[in-house]
Image (cartoon, rainbow, N blue to C red):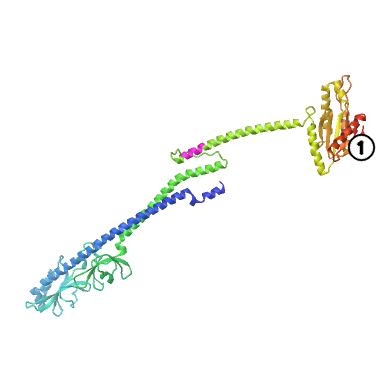
Amino acid sequence: MPDSWLAERRQPRDSLATKIIFFVFLSTFVTSLVVSWVAVHSTYSFLRAHLERLYPATLQGADEALDHAQQEVATRLTRLAREPALHQAIAGDAAARAQSERLLAERIDPSSRLAALTLRDASGVPRAATRGDSPPAAALPADGALHVSDGRLVIGVPVQDERGRTIGRIDGVLVPAERLLGVDDPAVASWVHVVDADGRIVARGGARSPDGFTAFPAELLTASDGTRLREFRGADGRRAIGATHRLALGDWSLVVAQPLESAYAPVFAVVTRIFVIDLAVVLLFSFLAYEITSAIVRPLEQLSEAARRISQGELEVEIADHRRRDEIGLLTRTFNDMARRLRRNRAEIEQQHRQLREQNEQLQQANEVLEQLSITDGLTKLHNHRHFQETLTREIKRVSRTGETLALLLIDIDDFKALNDRLGHAAGDAVLVRIARILNESVRESDVLARYGGEEFVVLAPGTDLEGVAYLAEKVRTSVAESSFGVDPSGEPMRVTVSIGVAEYAGDRRGFFDTADRALYRAKAAGKNCVVGAEDFTRS
């Protein structure tokens, strides 16, 4: 294949296949981006709306559960504070103290919101306590409100005697906050935090905190629309989302919060799945585009290559026809029909060219024959008078340019008319033919021999001066005189002689021929069978 065609094939960016594949890839990619954006945006909007419903509901439920737990525990502790055994235990009765511990233990059951109970006297010294938990700090107020001691929720109520004097107190440690806040889902429970006025976490709704929060910023706690979702940055700089609700109990607040990547994990999961699906779709459609384009372009490339070969004269081209019913199949069959017609036309043209060449050759041969006949004497087969005149003109021009010598012999058969009258025209013609052969054998190859007319012959001798042409004329005369021409009617051998006049070209064409003609007449007058030159030079 030509280098230029290979260079074109090595430019895939400009090929039809590349353009189609790129268009399909771009269309699929843009479509995937739009669908992905719509899907992600819809998922984000749905998740945001879900969180905007879930967070306030969680806060409200936790608030109600915490308030209910505080009221229930405070009521139970108040009733418990009226037990006489507790009063006796505070007074220092050992038996009553043991009874008080059994009584306190009875109040701790699986359905209770209490984890531990401690009975103290007026000075804060523990008099009885349940096992399983350390006693709370004695400095907490006995006001029936929730307090925090060592990370635990504690409620204290006073113990009064029958005269209304405060003789001690009962401290109740509540069960962990995840059991108090009324959140059944462990994952949701871990989002709930009880915080103080400074944003420090007082208690958590979950058994453990996977989110890593240690405190919350003031702008989250002081938001006027606390139950609405707000984005913020935690102490470690991570972005998070949360909502807050101010509790009626002191300066505490409830906070529901998650790291942003955790809150929007479903969105990220959707984005990942969409990315994988988009990539698979783009690759799939690109592959399909490649296969479809190859199925279209490959026949086009075959057609292009076949057309290129035809343009270079290779008509023996045939594209495989797979009997396709589409435009490619129609184009293939049409191309093959065109190639077959071109081959037939070429065969016909070649046949016509052969005929024309044969006819031209015949015509050229005929022209050559005619040309030869036009310059040849029909009887003697020597050059005729016309050819001699044309040659004489060319030779005179040549010697006039080069300065070379040129000589002329004018030959006449002696007594030819008498011989012709005596023996007949047939014998005369035979003599002319015989003399023509003798002359042709006697002159040089460079000399021009012609029948000038009747019984006269002429020889044009290029490169010959007067002395040389006289020698040549003598040779011709001798050859004729010594030749036999058969026998006459009397039985005697027949002899024929010639008279020759010679001349050398001296710059005048007319004078050149007239000089030779005068020399011939002088040879006739001198007795014939002789050679006469322009200076009466004669040999016999």
The residue positioned farthest toward the bottom in the image shown: 123
Snapshot quadrant of residue 239: bottom left
The residue at 24%/61% (across/down) is 53
Residue 336 in magenta? yes
Seen in the picture, residue 287 relative to 534 is either above or below; the reply is below
- 8 horizontally vs 147: left or right: right
The residue at 48%/49% (across/down) is 15
- 204 horizontally vs 377: left or right: left
Seen in the picture, residue 344 relative to 4 is either above or below; the reply is above
Q: Position of residue 348 (x, y in %)?
A: 58, 33
Three-letter residue code for mark 1: Glu
Seen in the picture, residue 167 relative to 296 is either above or below; the reply is below
Residue tagged 1: 535
- For the C terminus, the quadrant is top right
Q: What element carries label 1?
A: loop
Residue 508 visible to an observer of this rendering: yes
Crowdedness near tag 1: few (<14), some (14–19) or many (≥20) residues, C-alpha within 10 Å: few
- 341 horizontally vs 117: left or right: right
Q: Where is residue 73 in the image (x, y as percent from the top left)?
A: 14, 69
The one nearer the camera, 390 or 270, is: 390
Q: What stretch is highlighted in magenta?
A: 330-337
Residue 472 visible to an observer of this rendering: no
Snapshot quadrant of residue 243: bottom left
Snapshot quadrant of residue 79: bottom left
The one nearer the camera, 143 or 358, is: 358
Q: Position of residue 300 (x, y in %)?
A: 48, 44
Q: Where is residue 533 in the image (x, y as percent from the top left)?
A: 90, 35
Residue 446 in magenta? no
- What number of labels is visible? 1
- 505 horizontally vs 241: left or right: right
The residue positioned farthest toward the top in the image shown: 490
The one nearer the camera, 350 or 138, is: 350
